[in-house]
Amino acid sequence: MGETYATTDLGPHRRPASAPTVRAVTRAANGDGVPGWTNWAGTASATPRRRAVPRDEADLAAHVARAAADGLHVRAVGAGHSFTPAAVTDGLLLDLDRVSLVEAVSRSGDAIHVTVGAGIRLHRLNAALAAAGLAMANLGDIDRQSIAGAISTGTHGTGARLGGLATQVRGVRVVGADGTVRAVSADREPGLFAASRLGLGATGVLSAVTLEVVPAFLLRAQEEPWPLDRVLDGLAAADDDPDGLVGGNDHVEFYWFPHTRRALTKRNNRLAPDEEDAALERLRTSGPGPVARARTWLDEELLSNGAFGLVNRVATAVPRVTPRLNAVSARALAPRTYVAPSHEVFVTSRRVRFREMEYAVPRESLVDVLTAIDAWLERSGEHVPFPVEVRFAAPDDVWLSTAYRRPTAYVAVHQYARLSHERYFEAVERIVAEVDGRPHWGKLHGLDAARLAELYPRLGDFTAVRDAADPQGVFANAYTDRVLGPAGS
């Protein structure tokens, strides 16, 4: 039998606060006084018939059953950080902020499992895990999403030997249209588990998630501006080459500044055990120190957010100066190396609003894709002040994972919220289509179910499970109908 301990062992992190710094906003109410909703990026909005903030799983199940009986569609919302209309509904919109307790931690052999309410935000989960000496093995670079929203849309971090957040899920509880709560895993109703751990909420509303976590660990972060050609040369090495850029680091990503040949590289690596002991002692006794704290504020708050916001406003007002602004931005951040707990290294503060599209491409096609994007920008005259972000993931077996059965590179293109993004995104979408790129489920893209069925070999298996779990399409909306096909189709 594995050792289990309860929520009280995680102390004050049991009940997260419900007011994150990044979230969707409330819009004008409908005719019945129910507040409307808009996502963080301003790319999707809804005027639901009802809104509810269930206090626990039983209350959540009652709200779902009542809405279904009344003929309403049901969708759940977390931080509203998806750029798509994934959470939009004209029926019942559920806010899961209060379904957010850390329920239990269990140990069986070397495996450590944590069960949490589906509405818990990632930054609160990270704090609770850290208090218990635990951590997620990998994370994305934004921590304001709910765990349910993050796994359901395919959120991922970077690391050629690691998968996205859904690969860390070992079980979920799903609320069906009749209010029944089903606990599923790879051993118990494996089809429903496979479809629910990354499935856009189409099989039901998640009420709890069980994650496999690891003992807390430190990362050494190295951030350096590099010439783009040096980056591309580093990508030429095989993923298993310990001297290559990707294979030689636990987590690597880079940001290429369009209209330049410069990139910011970020390499994050675990410390050796003896190094970690010494680093932990330094952090316990002295913290990061005044110089490191000032450098963090300068790089992340002033240059990455404050000054970057100004750069984008200037580029909006005077587009022709964008290449020069990007050249300055690409050289503004000095190299830095620091050691910190993993979740502090993975996460980046993002306050400049933007639109984003991200595609997963075969690892071996990455350089060709970047070269084609660069060539299109050169000949099109399009001005893009936001860098292109590139990350990596191992192949996995999650049915709707963007990294399903292939080593993957992610190419994320962004545009400032006050600038038009359509022409740029459409061009990139045409480029990645040549290599069978798969779109991130929570970011902007133009594909439909017919094309996605060609890209995801298990989409038919997914829709069969979805149709059995929700034959009436209670949990559907226009977006899920477009990308998955209508229930029963």
Image: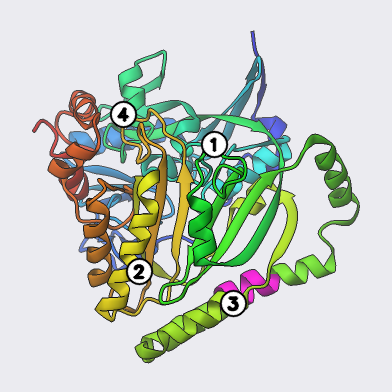
- Residue that sits furthest to the top in the current view: 1
Q: Read off the magenta span.
A: 297-306
Q: Earlier in the sequence, mark 1 or mark 3?
A: 1
Q: Earlier in the sequence, mark 4 or mark 3?
A: 4
Judged from the image, the secondary structure of the residue bearing numbered disc 2 is: helix
Residue receiving disc 3: 331
Question: Residue 152: where, in percent of width, then height?
Answer: 37, 40
* Residue 391 is a magenta residue: no
Residue receiving disc 2: 374
Label 2 Cα neighbours within 10 Å, binned few <14 / some 14-19 / many ≥20: some
Q: How far separated are the C-alphas under marks 2 and 3? A: 19 Å
Location of residue 321 with respect to 372 vertically, above or below: below
Residue receiving disc 1: 240
- Residue that sits furthest to the left in the current view: 489
Q: Nearer the viewer, mark 2 or mark 4?
A: 2
Nearer to the camera, 296 or 76: 296
Do the numbered discs 2 and 4 sit on residues whose CB atoms are within 8 Å?
Answer: no
Location of residue 180 with respect to 167 vertically, above or below: above
- Residue that sits furthest to the right in the current view: 285
Judged from the image, the secondary structure of the residue bearing numbered disc 3 is: helix
Looking at the image, residue 322 sits to the left or right of residue 42; the answer is right
Quadrant of the image containing the C terminus: top left
Given the image, on which type of amino acid does mark 4 rest? Answer: Ala
At a point 46% along the width and 41% down the height, the residue shown is: 393
Judged from the image, the secondary structure of the residue bearing numbered disc 1 is: loop
At a point 68% along the width and 67% down the height, the residue shown is: 335
Q: How far separated are the C-alphas under marks 2 and 4? A: 37 Å
Q: Residue 423's image quarter? A: bottom left
Q: Earlier in the sequence, mark 4 or mark 1?
A: 4
Q: How far separated are the C-alphas under marks 4 and 1? A: 31 Å
Residue receiving disc 4: 195
